[in-house]
């Protein structure tokens, strides 16, 4: 006897796969922040948009989302080991801190050359953090992917503040 797979079985299987996946859609928030940081070097009017940028948590992002995967992404996040979830949230806090450091530093004024240096340092550090967050999500919440070098991040922030 040949086993048949019904349309309903396929849908339920798809739902199971989808429910076990985190979503990189959350990272669009940070891609926007990086874009604004990089644009601030060329367009001072972008600063108002950068100042208006606000961080949002992973769950809050998907609770406010109309994406089909929103519920599944939230469920997958809540199913993570709490230690992995905290590691990811710490990584996101580091990105938020970096954005705020850039805003404060650029808002203080100073020479145009120092603005370019601030943006260059911040963008490089931000890309590193962004890459780690992307790897974490794509690896299904691998805590080691969320780990980052806090000393390296602090060194980047110190360099920004010293300009």
Image: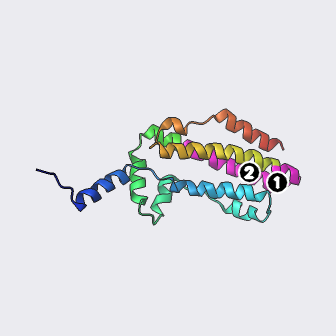
Q: Residue at the location (27% across, 57% down)?
A: 10
Q: Residue at the location (39% across, 58% down)?
A: 71
Q: How is the image coloured?
A: rainbow
Q: Which element type, helix, strand or loop, lies under badge 2?
A: helix
Q: Residue furthest right?
A: 111
Task: Return the x and y of residue 38 as percentages of the image width and height.
Answer: 73, 55
Looking at the rendered structure, which numbered label has been put on residue 108? Answer: 1
Question: Would you say residue 110 is visible in this rendering?
Answer: no
Residue 109 in magenta? yes
Q: Is there a contact, CB below 8 Å, between mark 2 and mark 1?
A: no
Q: Can you tell which of label 2 and label 1 is closer to the viewer?
A: 2
In this figure, what is the number of numbered marks? Answer: 2
Looking at the rendered structure, which numbered label has been put on residue 102? Answer: 2
Residue 124 in magenta? no
Q: Which residues are magenta?
A: 89-116
Q: Nearer the viewer, residue 129 or 109?
A: 129
Answer with the quarter of the image where residue 163 lies.
top right
Q: Residue at the location (65% across, 56% down)?
A: 33
Task: Return the x and y of residue 140 as percentages of the image width and height.
Answer: 44, 44
Measured Cα–Cα span from mark 2 to mark 1: 10 Å
Looking at the rendered structure, which numbered label has been put on residue 1? Answer: none
- Label 2 vs 1, first from the N-terminus: 2
Question: Residue 33 vs residue 69: left or right?
Answer: right
Answer with the quarter of the image where residue 48 lies.
bottom right
């Amino acid at each position: 006897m040949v086993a048949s797979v019904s349309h309903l079985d396929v849908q339920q299987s798809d739902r199971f796969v989808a429910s076990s996946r985190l979503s990189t859609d959350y990272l669009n928030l940070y891609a926007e922040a990086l874009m604004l940081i990089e644009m601030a070097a060329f367009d001072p009017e972008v600063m108002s948009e950068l100042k208006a940028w606000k961080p949002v948590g992973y769950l809050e992002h998907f609770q406010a989302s109309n994406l089909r995967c929103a519920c599944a992404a939230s469920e997958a996040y809540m199913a993570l080991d709490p230690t992995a979830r905290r590691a990811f949230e710490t990584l996101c806090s580091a990105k938020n801190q970096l954005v705020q450091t850039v805003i404060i530093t650029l808002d203080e004024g100073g020479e145009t050359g120092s603005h370019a240096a601030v943006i260059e340092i911040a963008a490089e550090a931000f890309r590193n953090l962004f890459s780690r967050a992307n790897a974490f999500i794509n690896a299904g919440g691998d805590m080691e992917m969320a780990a980052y070098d806090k000393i390296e991040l602090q060194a980047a922030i110190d360099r920004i503040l010293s300009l």
